[in-house]
Image (cartoon, rainbow, N blue to C red):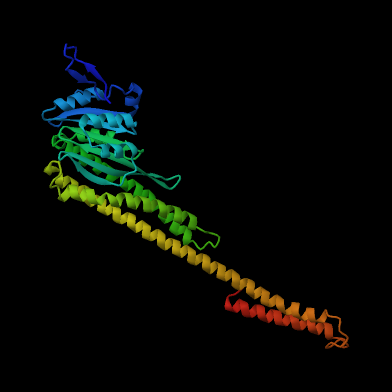
Amino acid sequence: MPARRNGGGADGAATVRAPPTAQLSEEEIRSAVVDIGVYDAGQRLGGHIELSSALTKADSCQDGFVWIGLHDPSPGVVEAVGEHFRLHPLAVEDAVHGHVRAKLEVYGGDTLFVVLKTGRYIDSDELIEIGEVMVFIGPRFVVSVRHGEGSPLHDVRLDLEAHPDLLSIGPSSVLYAIADRIVDDYVAVIDGIAMDVEEVEAEVFSGQLSSNAAQRIYRLKREVLGFRRAAGALVGPIQRLSSKQTGLPIDPRTGEYFRDVYDHLLRDVERIAGFDDLLTNALHANIAQITMRDNRDMRRISAWVAIIAVPTMVFGLYGMNFRHMPELGWTYGYPAVVAAVLAICAALYWKFKRTGWL
């Protein structure tokens, strides 16, 4: 419970709640807060301010708003901000723990909660790191909570501050700018995947029988599937922001901006789905090549077994100690048998070579 202090009256009736950040350490706040700004009429006022001051200014804003940016904050910081702005406990819980599917929720009629999925490609490991940005939008505040290293929002803030006409729309413009940057950053991930998919295809169809790219293909396919799931889940919320804004506490002037984000997102999702299909085809081609290689090896082994079976059978018969055997008394019997065996083996070799078994 928040700390309280007495008002000093005789009746003891007056009490004042301490600010929700009072129980947070300076280090805890400093590690979580990326930037905080107060905006009015498309302009930033007063530069960077402290978290406690920002919460106070948000309450006193008449036309502007406060944007609080947090990165991998502790639960205490998120809960303190949520308590001050009276954010829904379920939304605060999602912002604390993360790992939430992309979604859009409206709480209390005037607070919007949006979960956006970020993407970052680690080329050295061929891994796609999926992060999250949770955005709370209210009449006089924006709280962005970022988990992971993907899509830093500092440049988003600077770019938005360089466009006062857009920034003057209010908190809705911040949500647009964040969504636009996240979707644009998908392009870098897609380009990284495209290069690796091309390398996989070249490896599969290189003709090198020793090449087996199945493990790499499966790993890439798993990463693409996770990225496809994250980006695909974002289509619904962005579509609603772009065309079905009824009941949403956002400025309708942002509709055309969100439509542009929606178009880019659909393009990205289609390309990601294309990678999934390409990797599936490459995996099937690789399996088919391995099967053909195994069949070719089996044919080669079978051909040599058939050739070796001839002298094995003949010499095995002559190795038995019987008194009456064909050509035992003939002077040229031994060389004749050897010559016959070699001739049969040569004929079998020529036959298998002609049919491609050797």
* Vertical position of residue 323 compared to residue 283: above or below: below
257 on left or right of 231: left
258 on left or right of 351: left
The picture places residue 171, in percent across and down from the top left corner, at 17, 36
Residue at (19% x, 49% y) in the render:
240
Q: Nearer the viewer, residue 246 or 45?
A: 246
The picture places residue 66, in percent across and down from the top left corner, at 19, 30
How many numbered marks have been drawn onto this rendered protein structure?
A: 0
Residue at (75% x, 77% y) in the render:
312
* Vertical position of residue 183 compared to residue 3: above or below: below
Q: Quadrant of the C terminus?
A: bottom right
* Residue 196 visible in image: no
Residue at (86% x, 84% y) in the render:
322
Q: Nearer the viewer, residue 328 or 243?
A: 243
Which of the 4 image quarters holds residue 70?
Answer: top left
* Vertical position of residue 82 compared to residue 201: above or below: above
Q: Nearer the viewer, residue 322 or 281?
A: 322
The picture places residue 79, in percent across and down from the top left corner, at 28, 31
* Residue 63 visible in image: yes
Q: Quadrant of the N terminus?
A: top left
Residue closest to the far front: 11
Residue at (27% x, 28% y) in the render:
80
Which of the 4 image quarters holds residue 167?
Answer: top left
The picture places residue 140, in percent across and down from the top left corner, at 16, 32
